[in-house]
């Protein structure tokens, strides 16, 4: 495959998933804003803690399946083993049914115990609605992984958008209805959170129905490929072994990422209670940290997550055929693309955090100062979460499955010890969580980058990958702050001042980055509207 073909395949498929990730995140922001205002800070705290627990179960049962199935399917398709790639999907579905059912039962029947453990009154109500979602998402993950392994990201992208739209509509309506019906109950915030989680279940179910339709449409083509395949069929035992051996490292890696959040919730809730902080205040602060801060931080990271999902099959195929130069080339272009998005996002959140918070969460004004301070102090987490996510995908795609797990485990141990000390023996409070939130991806990123350099013999292009985006972002940040302050002084309208300053930021950043030579003309031509961008930049 020529470099031109490599770039085209990588960016077309990566852009599809990245675009879907951005769209779903935008939809997520749109619906979370009214829902957050409906639930209030206390309801948001219960909602976020329940989702932290749910994400652990989802990671153990589901999150690993798209990556694992994608990796196994793409490896067999590289050798034209069509029947074996199809059998990977069918056996993975059986695996998903088993682990999804176990996770569902554990959350549903253990909800009361978890409520007591996390010291969060009413937590069991949203957990019981989230329980069956783990089974639905487990099955959904297999279908997504199968089509991604075939190099087709479109079904996954469409299903994500369908899932998020249904999720948004049902979550808002259910949260409003539940808080209205149970307005006189002391657990009204818990009922509201439960209503918000109902959208997650219905959205996942809608996406699963869509994939069943897609599979039915593609079945004649799959059967035709299976008939012409003359390779030996792998026994079920070998397939299950391959699934388990591939799933376990991904599970461990993803679980370590997710478990950090719920451990933080557990430590913060119990240590603050020991210090005499009321349950209402603790829930409210957790709502600020997990809803206002983390939601904004996670938006740009969605691009890295989407690119990571599309990277695995492409890098696997290059690795299978032994093309090390192609693997390094893909590594170079993917990391640079992610940093060009993550760095300005971090700077933008830092300098415009206060007006963004005021615009998005008008009914949560009690903690606006805290939320904007968290964004100013912790926006750098965007860069390191993006970098740790994409470098983990690169290592996994290059058959180094255990290395990211070890790195994440090392970072998690440091993270838990650090957060415990900061919460227990200092008065930092939620800023202790913030410090842990930033240091965790920093350690993973440094260890991953070191392994990529050492094992893959990859040379990091520090100037173009890191320094130039930082340089352009600093200039962008200064221009956007100047624009916002000037307009707000003149018209005193936050929304218009913010929108104008963001537009200025995009233009300034794009001009500085393009003129700095961060991207070559060939790389730009492979991007959407790259020809126009190259002509504008006079490259």
Image (cartoon, rainbow, N blue to C red):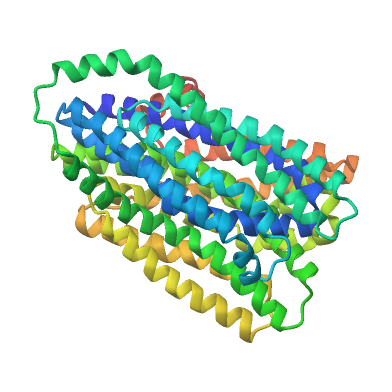
* Rendered location of residue 413, percent (x, y): 43, 74
Disc tally is: 0
Pick whichever, 127 or 271, lies toward us.
127
The residue at 77%/36% (across/down) is: 173
Q: Quadrant of residue 251?
A: bottom left
Q: Quadrant of residue 422?
A: bottom right
The residue at 65%/70% (across/down) is: 116
Pick whichever, 214 or 419, lies toward us.
214
* Rendered location of residue 418, percent (x, y): 52, 77
Left or right of 510, for residue 69: left
* Rendered location of residue 319, percent (x, y): 19, 41
Left or right of 264, for residue 292: right
Q: Quadrant of residue 373?
A: bottom right
Left or right of 273, for residue 226: left
Relative to 220, residue 300 above or below:
below
Look at the image and tell me whether residue 435 can be seen: yes
The residue at 81%/36% (across/down) is: 496
Please state, as top left, top right, bottom left or bottom right, where the C terminus lies in the image. Answer: top left
Relative to 198, residue 189 above or below:
below
Relative to 317, residue 192 above or below:
below
* Rendered location of residue 402, percent (x, y): 27, 59
Pick whichever, 28 or 318, lies toward us.
28
């Amino acid at each position: 495959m020529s470099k031109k073909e490599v770039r085209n395949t990588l960016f077309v498929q990566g852009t599809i998933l990245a675009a879907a990730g951005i769209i779903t995140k935008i939809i997520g922001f749109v619906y979370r804003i009214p829902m957050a205002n409906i639930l209030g800070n206390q309801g948001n705290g219960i909602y976020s803690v329940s989702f932290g627990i749910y994400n652990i179960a989802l990671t153990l049962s589901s999150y690993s399946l798209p990556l694992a199935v994608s990796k196994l399917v793409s490896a067999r398709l590289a050798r034209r083993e069509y029947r074996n790639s199809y059998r990977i999907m069918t056996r993975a579905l059986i695996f998903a049914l088993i682990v999804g059912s176990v996770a569902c039962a554990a959350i549903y029947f253990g909800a009361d115990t978890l409520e007591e453990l996390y010291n969060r009154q009413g937590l069991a109500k949203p957990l019981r609605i989230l329980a069956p979602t783990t089974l639905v998402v487990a099955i959904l993950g297999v279908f997504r992984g199968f089509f991604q392994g075939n190099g087709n990201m479109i079904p996954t992208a469409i299903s994500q958008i369908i899932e998020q739209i249904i999720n948004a509509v049902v979550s808002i309506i259910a949260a409003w209805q539940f808080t209205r019906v149970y307005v006189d109950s002391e657990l009204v915030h818990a009922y509201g959170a439960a209503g918000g989680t109902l959208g997650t279940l219905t959205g996942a179910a809608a996406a699963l129905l869509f994939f069943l339709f897609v599979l039915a449409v593609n079945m004649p083509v799959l059967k035709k490929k299976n008939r012409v395949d003359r390779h030996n069929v792998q026994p079920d035992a070998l397939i299950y072994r391959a699934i388990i051996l591939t799933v376990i490292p991904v599970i461990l890696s993803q679980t370590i990422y997710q478990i950090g959040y719920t451990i933080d919730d557990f430590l913060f809730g119990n240590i603050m209670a020991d210090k005499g902080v009321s349950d209402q205040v603790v829930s409210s602060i957790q709502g600020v940290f997990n809803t206002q801060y983390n939601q904004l931080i996670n938006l740009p990271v969605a691009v890295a997550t989407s690119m990571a999902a599309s990277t695995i099959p492409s890098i696997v195929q290059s690795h299978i055929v032994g093309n090390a130069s192609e693997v390094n080339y893909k590594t170079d272009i993917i990391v640079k693309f992610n940093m060009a998005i993550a760095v300005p996002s971090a700077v933008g959140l830092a300098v415009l955090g206060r007006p963004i918070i005021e615009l998005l969460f008008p009914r949560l004004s009690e903690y606006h100062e805290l939320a904007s301070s968290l964004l100013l102090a912790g926006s750098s987490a965007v860069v390191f979460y993006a970098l740790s996510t994409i470098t983990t995908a690169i290592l996994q795609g290059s058959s180094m499955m255990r290395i990211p797990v070890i790195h994440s485990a090392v970072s998690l141990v440091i993270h838990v010890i650090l957060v415990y000390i900061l919460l227990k023996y200092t008065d930092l409070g939620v800023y202790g969580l913030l410090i842990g939130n930033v240091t965790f991806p920093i350690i993973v990123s440094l260890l991953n980058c070191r392994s990529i350099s050492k094992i893959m013999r990859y040379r990091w292009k520090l100037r173009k990958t890191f320094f130039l985006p930082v340089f352009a972002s600093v200039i962008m940040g200064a221009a956007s702050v100047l624009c916002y302050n000037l307009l707000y002084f003149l018209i005193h309208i936050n929304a218009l001042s913010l929108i104008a300053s963001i537009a200025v930021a995009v233009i300034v950043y794009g001009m500085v980055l393009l003129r700095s030579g961060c991207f070559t003309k060939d790389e730009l031509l492979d991007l959407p509207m790259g020809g126009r961008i190259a002509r504008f930049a006079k490259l």
